[in-house]
Image (cartoon, coloured by chain):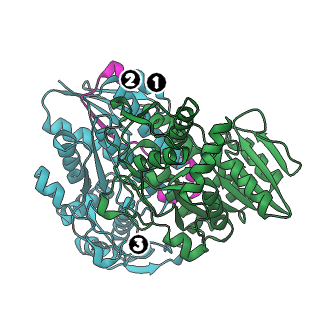
Chain colours: A cyan, B green
């Protein structure tokens, strides 16, 4: 039986990873870890522990008793805005939980394969002509969250090369899908547009800068990439997880509006425009495709349709 | 009166910084911080506090009451070997003390100028033809200590650019001089050679790989660079602190032996040869020279003579 440990299991991505396993694995079990008291779901193949990953001794006990084959490290404080407000807290939490996990694995189950999730934020600001961002580019992180991700990735590489752990790293770009909370920009837009549709198709969208271009990937394609990297990736290597396509937020809004057959008014709220935002972030997924046979299965329109369906029900 | 706060004041560099101030400043005082209970020296212009810099509240009280104009952040766990043994402890200490300091300054004395000391270790392994290492090179840290230094530098840049703090960064190469402890390679060599001289000029040096090339700078030239960067450097900028010259360890031994007029036997001890060591590390000091008018004042021979004199007395 394959044993998976998933940190931050209660989040958007954790649930999809679980669902991927239920669809693709025959004989497996999952130990999920998160900070919330209650298990996010019930299943005989799923056990849950509430733990603060900074408590190294508690984490180590779990690692010893569960003895995972695979570890998916999703837990993090992932708000860029919050990292500007509490830089020391965000940085020390995100690097500290990674180090507590890595040290527990080094001591107790060094053969386990670990997926260390990073972020496109690690690249920082690159000009349009540098797109798509490739793994070999220099990292120029522009916020405290991003610096913590760079440190985690650099430490991961050392754990692989210096201690021989089987740790693989990602730089994950924007992922979207049903069930994503509306504090994020895309579900917030979809939710607003669904509400406009419900109230007769007339209404106004309040938006920030919608001329920015981002690389959106369906969370289910993200999980397929994570699974491939976790099970077949090369230790010490980093993989972009992205679509390779840039989509302007304005185009995203227009696509959803077209599906919903509405024509909303769009109002730019200067309070929502972030002054130092990168205008364009597009990743290259060539390494993921070439080395791990990954391919995007969910088209942008399919994802948006599924998100619309989700918000129509909720 | 100019007020200087120096962290890690009890170390090799801290004492030289103090001596530089006594020689170059008319009206100044220093608040020194370190982990040891006793002040490293006594002077009416010098106050000392024993503090663990991870104790953010205690540090903040000191910052509030002293209200420094200049902060020289020398404190760190700086052993690469130790960082491989205790990676989480070393990383979280070095980044944690920097963040505690930066957060205290941001809250309490945001106009202070801060020198954030980094290391040539941040560059990692570059081939011979890439020498000398320049500030714009990509960072490829090869040990946990080096990753912590990279994180500290990246965070420093954000504190400068995102919060407007006056923080300047260094990448400091090997520094040497009298009073350096013989756990480091150069004072260890000088001490051994002085002992051989004392016992009649015949004897054997036990060495590791002495074909490696390093960039050595007299600690007094380091301090002159630090003072210039601290007082006139550009916030958010990083400066190599180095001689620009590569010296083979074998040449260093031969130079000291020649000064002492001895001909020691040299025995390579495989236990002292580090397997993954960079063969050649040389920095470029062009930025420091061009932008801050720095120049090396102590020749390599002068430094070695002073070190010999120190070990002859001790």
SS for callout 1: helix
- Picture quadrant of residue B228: bottom right
Q: Taking A180 as reference, is A255 above or below it? A: below
Contact between marks 2 and 1 (CB within 8 A): the answer is yes
Residue name at image x 23 percent, y 46 percent: A226
Residue name at image x 39 percent, y 28 percent: A104
Contact between marks 3 and 1 (CB within 8 A): the answer is no
Chain letter of mark 3 equals A
Circle 1 residues within 10 Å: few <14, some 14–19, many ≥20: few
Q: Which label number is shown at residue A231?
A: none
Alpha carbon separation for disc pair 3 and 1:
40 Å
Residue under circle 3? A278
Q: Would residue A12 be visible to someone looking at this image?
A: yes
Chain letter of mark 2 equals A
Q: Is residue A79 magenta?
A: yes
Alpha carbon separation for disc pair 2 and 1:
7 Å
Residue A118 as seen in the image, left or right of residue B186: left
Q: Which label number is shown at residue A62?
A: 2
Q: Earlier in the sequence, mark 3 or mark 1?
A: 1
Alpha carbon separation for disc pair 3 and 2:
41 Å
Residue under circle 1? A58
What's the magenta region?
A62-89
The total number of labels drawn is 3
Q: Are marks 3 and 1 on the same chain?
A: yes
């Amino acid at each position: 039986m394959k044993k998976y440990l998933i940190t931050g299991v209660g989040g958007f991505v954790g649930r999809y990873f679980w669902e991927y396993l239920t669809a693709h694995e025959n004989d497996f079990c999952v130990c999920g870890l998160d900070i919330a008291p209650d298990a996010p779901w019930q299943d005989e193949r799923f056990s849950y522990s509430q733990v603060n990953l900074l408590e190294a001794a508690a984490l180590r006990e779990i690692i010893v008793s569960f003895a995972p084959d695979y570890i998916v490290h999703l837990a993090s404080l992932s708000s860029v805005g919050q990292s500007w407000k509490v830089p020391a807290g965000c940085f020390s939490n995100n690097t500290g939980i990674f180090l507590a996990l890595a040290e527990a694995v080094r001591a107790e189950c060094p053969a386990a394969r670990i997926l260390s999730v990073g972020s496109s934020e690690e690249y920082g600001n690159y000009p349009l002509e540098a797109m798509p961002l490739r793994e070999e580019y220099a990292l120029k992180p522009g916020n405290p969250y991003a610096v913590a991700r760079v440190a985690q990735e650099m430490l991961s590489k050392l754990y692989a090369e210096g201690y021989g752990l089987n740790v693989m790293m990602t730089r994950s770009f924007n992922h979207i899908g049903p069930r994503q909370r509306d504090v994020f920009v895309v579900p917030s837009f979809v939710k607003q547009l669904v509400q406009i549709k419900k109230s007769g198709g007339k209404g106004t969208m309040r938006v920030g800068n919608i001329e920015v271009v981002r690389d959106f990937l369906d969370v289910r394609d993200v999980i397929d990439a994570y699974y491939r990297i976790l099970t077949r990736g090369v230790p010490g290597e980093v993989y972009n997880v992205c679509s390779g396509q840039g989509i302007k937020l304005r185009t995203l809004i227009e696509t959803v509006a077209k599906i919903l057959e509405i024509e909303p008014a769009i109002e730019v709220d200067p309070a929502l425009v972030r002054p130092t935002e990168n205008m364009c972030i597009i990743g290259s997924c060539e390494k993921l495709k070439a080395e791990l046979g990954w391919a995007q299965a969910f088209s942008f329109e399919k994802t948006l349709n599924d998100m619309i369906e989700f918000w129509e029900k909720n």
